[in-house]
Image (spheres, rainbow, N blue to C red):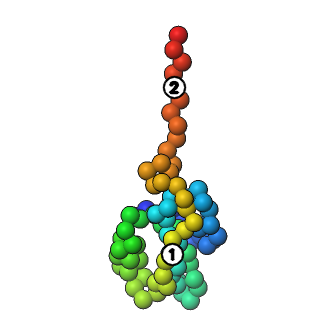
């Protein structure tokens, strides 16, 4: 599991250039709602991570609007060397 943005604006989850395995996690800290943008292969990984830290303050998580294959997300195109 990888946290992409911690304590962020929930509108970041509307970005379609995110990988499709990205989730918006909602939890409560000191009576205020907080949001994290998390990339995980399985939902159980999200649950385990947040349960260990926040216990009963977890409100839930939902999948983001991401459409990109996680294997291709974040990769940069390699420049080809020019042949002489």
Quadrant the N terminus occupies: bottom left
Q: Secondary structure at mark 1?
A: strand
How far apart marks 2 and 1 lie (CA) works out to: 40 Å
Which is more N-terminal, label 1 or label 2?
1
Whole-percent x and y of residue 82?
54, 18
Query: In screen coordinates, is 17 left or right of 58?
Result: right
Instruction: Give the number of the disc on residue 11.
Output: none
- Up-down: is 45 above or below 80? below
Mark sitting on residue 80:
2
* Residue 55 visible in the picture: yes
Q: Quadrant of residue 35?
A: bottom right
* Picture residue at 57% right of the left edge, 66% below the top: 65
Q: Which residue is mark 1?
A: 62
Question: Dividing the picture into quarters, in which one does residue 67 lie?
Answer: bottom right
Residue positioned 54% across, 68% down in the render: 64
Vertical comparison of 78 with 24: above or below: above
Picture coordinates of residue 17 (x, y %)?
Answer: 59, 56
Q: Residue placed farthest to the top in the image?
A: 84
């Amino acid at each position: 599991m990888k946290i992409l943005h911690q304590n962020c604006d929930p509108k970041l989850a509307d970005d379609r250039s995110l990988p499709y395995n990205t989730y918006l996690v909602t939890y409560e800290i000191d009576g205020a709602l907080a949001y994290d943008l998390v990339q995980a292969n399985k939902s159980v990984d999200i649950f385990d991570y947040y349960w260990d830290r926040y216990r009963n303050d977890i409100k839930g998580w939902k999948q983001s609007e991401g459409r990109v294959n996680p294997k291709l997300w974040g990769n940069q195109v390699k420049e080809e060397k020019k042949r002489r």
